Image: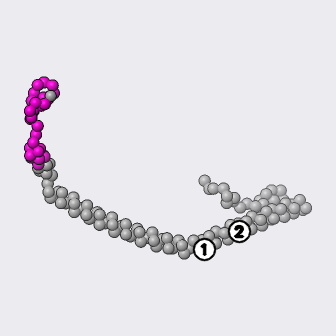
Amino acid sequence: MEMGGTRECGGRGEAMEKPTPEAAAAAAEEVSARFRSLVDPDDIASIRQTQHLILGRLQDSNAVLSHFNEYSEQCFAEVSGDFANKTRLLKSMKADLDHIFTKLRGMKARLAATYPDAFPDGAMSKTMDQRPDLEIPLD
């Protein structure tokens, strides 16, 4: 309960005066002065100088990376069409080779059926297509 500039605190009947704005400002000034006395100003200046140095290096690195990204984008634009054409060519060549090897396997099978004496036992399995399957990933 308040009574003329004082109020009860904690329900024990103790009265405490309300701090004035000047007293609050003085207390805040005292607290900040004590905090400032805990840290050496030279240390703060050194930390700020180091931060500015790091900031400069980061900005330089950012500029270099931006330039590299632009250059890489330009190079990719120049070669992407050629790369796509070569990829299509390789896929076409693979399909052609698969067709050729399929025909060769058929010819070998017909030769083995027509002339069984021409190929000794087990020789036909060695002459059959021994190339690896490129579609299966390597372990």
The residue furthest right is 114
Which label was assigned to residue 92?
2
In the rendered view, tell whether residue 133 sits above or below residue 68. above
Residue density around tag 2, few if under 14, some if 14–19, many if 20 or more, within 10 Å: few
- Dividing the picture into quarters, in which one does residue 80 lie? bottom right
- Confirm whether residue 118 shows in the render: no
Residue labelled with disc 1? 82
Q: Earlier in the sequence, mark 2 or mark 1?
A: 1
Q: Going 22% across and 60% down the picture, which residue do you hit?
A: 48
Q: Residue at x 84, y 60 (%)?
A: 109
Give the quarter of the image for residue 41: bottom left
Q: Position of residue 103 (x, y in %)?
A: 81, 65
**Residue 2: where, in percent of width, then height?**
13, 30
- Asked if residue 47 lies left or right of residue 4, the reply is right
Q: Disc 2 or disc 1, which is closer to the eye?
A: 1
Decide which of 129, 89 is in the foreground and name it.
89
Residue drawn where x is 73% and y is 65% of the image:
95
- As drawn, the residue found furthest toward the top would be 12
Identity, as a three-letter code, of the amino acid under mark 2: Ser
Residue 13 in the magenta stretch? The answer is yes
Measured as percent of width and height from the top left, residue 11 is found at 15, 25
Identify the element where label 2 is drawn.
helix
Q: Along the horizontal axis of the image, is 33 left or right of 79?
A: left
41 sits left or right of 59 in the view: left
User: Range of the magenta residues?
Assistant: 2-29
Residue 56 appears in the picture as rendered? yes
Q: Give the residue displayed 8% in from the left and 44% down from the top.
A: 23
Between 127 and 100, the one lying in front of the other is: 100
User: Of the residues shown, which amino acid type is indicated by label 1?
Assistant: Asp
Front-most of residues 33 and 21 = 21
